[in-house]
């Protein structure tokens, strides 16, 4: 098998700095984790919050701390630093080679999607952002690592795209249409979802938007691990 992970993200219209932060870290016992946080509001203040959250989670994951415990620790840190007055959403997607599973840790009211080939399930179990109290707990979902698995997570800018003009985005329908008609790469899926959201907002995104797509494919090629990043300046 081969796991591919792709990201597409953009800032809120007329705001120079995104309040979303995303980082990846190799797990000490094998595998990879991607951490995505969206700080409350937007701009520089939101960026400072999401950076603090992601860096806390990344440092703990790198030390071998479990995903759920890392999420709770980040929530406690944010609650302590901001007196419970500032929140952040948090998603962790981990490819765990010890258990041969993908572990999804979510503190985000926005759902995420798990697809097996062209069958798409919306995971919308109620979930709260971090930082609001010391009792916040993440929702954790674990699925087998197998060929044909596709997972899409995102910040709430994707969910709210098009609402202000009466054309709210239907992420599930869009994802199903892509998977039924073709076999898109994770980058093609992420780009298509983000592109549709931007169009629904008349090319002026109403919020920061980040989309992460993980796909498990049949293994091909060599044993080299690769990562590509594109940063328009």
Image: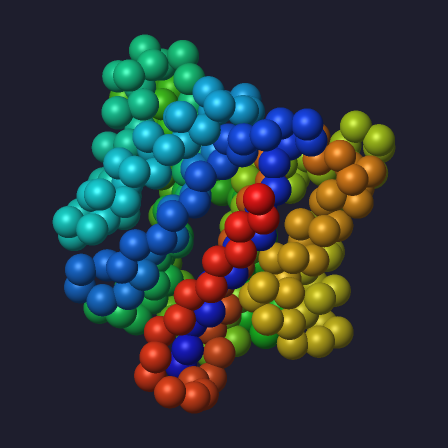
* Side of 165 relative to 198 (left or right): right
Rendered residue at 67%/53% (across/down): 193
Label tally: 0
Return the residue found at the far left. 63
Q: Is residue 106 visible?
A: yes
Give the camera-side residue of 100 and 15. Answer: 15
Location of residue 185 by image quarter: bottom right
Rendered residue at 38%/19% (across/down): 132
Give the camera-side residue of 43 and 119. Answer: 43
Residue 63 at x, y percent in the picture: 15, 49
* Side of 129 relative to 223 (left or right): right
Residue 107 at x, y percent in the picture: 42, 37
* Side of 43 relative to 170 (left or right): left
Rendered residue at 48%/23% (across/down): 44
Rendered residue at 51%/60% (across/down): 6
Question: Compared to 111, does 144 lie above or below?
Answer: below
Question: Compared to 39, does 174 lie above or below?
Answer: below
Return the residue found at the far bottom. 221
Here the colouring is rainbow
Image quarter in which the C terminus is found: top right
Image quarter in which the N terminus is found: bottom left
Question: Compared to 97, does 22 lie above or below?
Answer: above
Q: Is residue 207 visible?
A: no
Question: Compared to 133, does 138 lie above or below?
Answer: below
Residue 158 at x, y percent in the picture: 64, 41
Residue 112 at x, y percent in the picture: 54, 49
């Amino acid at each position: 098998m081969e796991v591919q992970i792709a990201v597409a993200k953009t800032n809120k219209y007329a705001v120079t700095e995104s309040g979303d932060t995303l980082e990846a870290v190799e797990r000490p016992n094998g595998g990879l984790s991607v951490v995505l946080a969206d700080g409350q509001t937007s701009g520089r203040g939101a960026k400072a919050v999401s950076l603090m959250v992601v860096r806390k989670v990344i440092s703990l994951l790198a030390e071998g701390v479990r995903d759920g415990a890392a999420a709770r620790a980040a929530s406690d840190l944010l609650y302590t630093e901001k007196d419970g007055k500032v929140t952040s959403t948090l998603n962790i997607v981990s490819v765990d080679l010890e258990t041969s599973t993908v572990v999804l840790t979510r503190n985000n009211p926005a759902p995420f999607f798990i697809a097996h080939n062209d069958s798409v399930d919306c995971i919308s179990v109620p979930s709260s952002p971090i930082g609001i109290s010391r009792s916040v707990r993440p929702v954790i979902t674990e699925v087998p690592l197998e060929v044909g698995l596709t997972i899409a997570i995102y910040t709430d800018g994707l969910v709210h795209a098009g609402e202000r003009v009466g054309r709210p985005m239907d992420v599930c329908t869009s994802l199903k249409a892509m998977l039924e008609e073709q076999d898109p790469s994770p980058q093609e899926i992420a780009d298509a979802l983000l592109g549709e959201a931007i169009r629904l907002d008349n090319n002026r995104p109403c919020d920061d938007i980040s989309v992460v797509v993980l796909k498990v494919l049949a293994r091909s090629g060599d044993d080299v691990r690769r990562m590509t990043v594109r940063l328009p300046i």
